[in-house]
Amino acid sequence: MIVQQIEQDFISAYKQKDEVRVRVLRLVKTAIKNLQVDLKRVPSEEEVLSLLHKQLKQRKDSIEQFILAKREDLAKKEEEELEILKAYLPEPITGHELLLLVKQTIENLQVTSKKDFGKVIGAITKEYKGRVDGKEVHTVVQDILQELDS
């Protein structure tokens, strides 16, 4: 399970005195523990992955804000943390692979117009939760359905 992997990596990073990795994994472990307290049970693998995605999104937002504020030093620090978090997430589906996935989903659902936009996005995000970026899926689905209506 991913929680055990995080724990092992934390101990390893601590022994190697990898301060950045220790800091990130300590924050992740704390977030998992808080989730466990909130749920009053051990979180499932899916819940932990969802938590990691939230952490990833927070880092991305922070990077954007730091760049706008011309704080390159803090943006670089957040990028380092972002890379550590990415190691614990499944490989994302992007680009051509996402395009094929959207086309296949549209075909499977027998979608013929823009009216079924939500149905397509719902099916993809439900089945591939955590592996697809919602904004990217939205754009690809919109482009393909626009072609269908033309």
Image: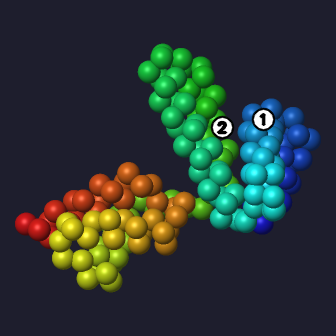
Relative image position of residue 121 (x, y in whole percent): 36, 65
SS at mark 1 in the image: helix
Callout 1 amino acid: Arg
Q: At x 17% / y 71%, what residue is drawn?
A: 113
Quarter of the C terminus within the rendering: bottom left
Q: Determine which residue is flagged by label 1.
A: 23
Q: Who is closer to the viewer here, 134 or 100?
A: 134
Relative image position of residue 102 (x, y in whole percent): 33, 70
Identify whether 52 is placed above or below 42: above
Relative image position of residue 56 (x, y in whole percent): 59, 44
Q: Who is closer to the viewer here, 55 or 12?
A: 55
Q: Who is closer to the viewer here, 145 or 19?
A: 145
Q: At x 61% / y 32%, what residue is drawn?
A: 78
Identify whether 78 is placed above or below 107: above
Q: Determine which residue is flagged by label 2.
A: 81
Relative image position of residue 51 (x, y in whole percent): 65, 52
Task: Give residue 39's quadrant in the image.
Answer: bottom right
